[in-house]
Image (cartoon, grey):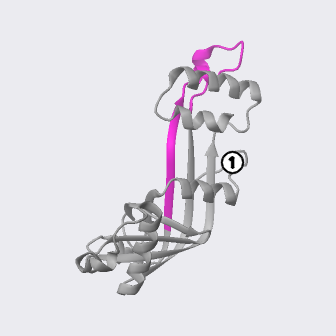
């Protein structure tokens, strides 16, 4: 993705975002495919360099990962459309302002390891459940569950973070946009406002 210097996130900020938004798109290009395999999935950032997840055995991603273990985990959160009039410079025709979209996005380039043994799958499931549903039953007591899934352990090799909120504009410009977002109250507006503060 294109990341301008004023939109770039530091590693710490990008990883905090990934932790706070534990659902993304796992993308495996495989080899010689017309299009990559893209899988929406819940995941756990276990530490700064390890992502854990599991998927159903029939998932088409397994063949692509076996062909090429280099994968991308893409996480994008709330977005907010910003009309051109809000971004027009004072004294200019507001109809000629340049619209944009505010959003956050982090991409993790990873090396994927497929986990097929029961002990490894249980380790992944227990970690995910401890994060999402503490006190849930032990997945070891659900043998049909284990036979129906495979696990993935992703080793993070590169972190690409983008927080596109007019970081290159002055405070007055950002205040005008914030006023518009506050008045509109649309689906992604509150998240965008937090970045403009």
In this view, the residue in front, 27 or 188, is: 188
Quadrant of the rendering where the C terminus is positioned = top right
Picture coordinates of residue 12, whole percent (x, y): 68, 59
Which residue lies under the disc numbered 1?
Answer: 4
In this view, the residue in front, 170 or 179, is: 179
Q: Which residue lies at the image location 68% right of the left edge and 14% below the top edge?
A: 92
Crowd around label 1: few <14 · some 14–19 · many ≥20 (10 Å): few
Residue 47, image quadrant: bottom right
Q: Which residue lies at the image location 53% right of the left edge and 32% below the top edge?
A: 189
Farthest left residue in view: 144
In the image, the segment drawn in magenta is: 72-100
Query: Magenta span has 153?
Result: no
Observer able to see residue 155: yes
Picture coordinates of residue 40, whole percent (x, y): 38, 58
Residue 118 as seen in the image, left or right of residue 170: left
Looking at the image, residue 104 lies above or below residue 41: above
Picture coordinates of residue 103, whole percent (x, y): 56, 42
Observer able to see residue 66: no
Query: Magenta span has 93?
Result: yes
Looking at the image, residue 75 lies above or below residue 189: below
Residue 126 as seen in the image, left or right of residue 169: left
Looking at the image, residue 97 lies above or below residue 164: above
Q: Which residue lies at the image location 39% right of the left edge and 86% below the top edge?
A: 119
In this view, the residue in front, 102 or 89, is: 102
Farthest front residue in view: 135
Residue 126, image quadrant: bottom left
Quadrant of the rendering where the N terminus is positioned = bottom right
Picture coordinates of residue 98, whole percent (x, y): 60, 27
Task: Name the secondary structure under disc 1.
Answer: loop
Looking at the image, residue 165 lies above or below residue 68: above
């Amino acid at each position: 993705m294109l990341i301008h210097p004023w939109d770039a996130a530091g590693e710490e900020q990008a990883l905090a975002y990934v932790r706070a938004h534990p659902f993304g798109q796992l993308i495996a290009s495989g080899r010689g495919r017309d299009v990559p395999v893209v899988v929406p999935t819940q995941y756990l950032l276990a530490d700064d360099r390890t992502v854990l997840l599991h998927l159903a055995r029939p998932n088409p991603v397994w063949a692509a990962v076996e062909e090429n273990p280099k994968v991308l985990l893409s996480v994008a959160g709330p977005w907010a459309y910003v009309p051109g009039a809000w971004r027009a410079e004072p004294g200019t025709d507001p109809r000629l302002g340049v619209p944009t979209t505010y959003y956050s996005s982090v991409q993790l380039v990873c090396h994927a390891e497929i986990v097929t043994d029961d002990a490894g799958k249980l380790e992944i499931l227990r970690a995910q459940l401890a994060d999402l549903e503490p006190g849930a039953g032990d997945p070891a007591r659900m043998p049909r569950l284990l036979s129906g899934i495979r696990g993935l352990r992703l080793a993070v090799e590169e972190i690409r973070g983008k927080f596109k909120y007019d970081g290159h504009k002055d405070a007055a410009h950002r205040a005008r946009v914030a006023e518009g977002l506050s008045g509109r109250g649309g689906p992604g507006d509150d998240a965008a406002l937090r970045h403009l503060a």
